Image: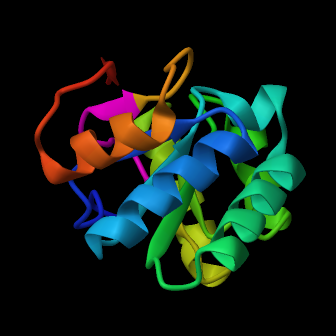
Amino acid sequence: MTAVPAHNRPIRIHSLTDADAACAAAAELGIPLLLVSAPGAAASAGAGWFREVAARAAARHPSVAMTAVLDCADRPGDALGALSAGIGAILFTGRLDVAERLADIAAQRGARLLTALPEALDLRGVRDPRRACRNWLSGRDEGHVTE
């Protein structure tokens, strides 16, 4: 299993607009970015959707070193599906023995499996996501956090 990435202020996104706002803020600040899907998005939105959102945001903001993590909750089938779809980093919060097996599979595919993240800024319902992201990433505002 992989430890939490060096980015200590992840941002939870729900749309391409959210991802663009987060990337724009990271670009302004010249810092790397950890994007995380909505909780359990592997089941609701799907791996293909998330892969495309992350790819489009990365293409629009090529200067940003971004890690995009698909939240698979505690669903091993969703985690396997995400890995099969080419997702490079997933969050799995299920049983430890299952996480260990999934981590082996992820490593074989050149992907990472995370089992936890630090608190994240959740952009759901945020009126000015770019400003919220800029404040969150610069450490000036706690914002609307989730665990």
Q: Is residue 76 above or below residue 35?
A: above
| Residue at 24 percent of width and 41 percent of height | 135
Q: Is residue 126 visible?
A: yes
Tell me where the magenta segment starts and ends, as one range. Answer: 113-121
Q: How is the image coloured?
A: rainbow
| Residue at 58 percent of width and 84 percent of height | 62
Q: Is residue 35 above or below residue 18?
A: below
Q: Is residue 34 above or below residue 139?
A: below
**Is residue 26 shown left or right of residue 128?**
left
Q: Position of residue 40 (x, y in %)?
A: 64, 27
Identify which residue, 53 or 102, lies in the foreground. 53
| Residue at 49 percent of width and 61 percent of height | 24
Identify which residue, 129 or 67, lies in the foreground. 129
Q: Position of residue 56 (x, y in %)?
A: 77, 66
Identify which residue, 147 or 127, lies in the foreground. 127
**Is residue 65 shown left or right of residue 13?**
left
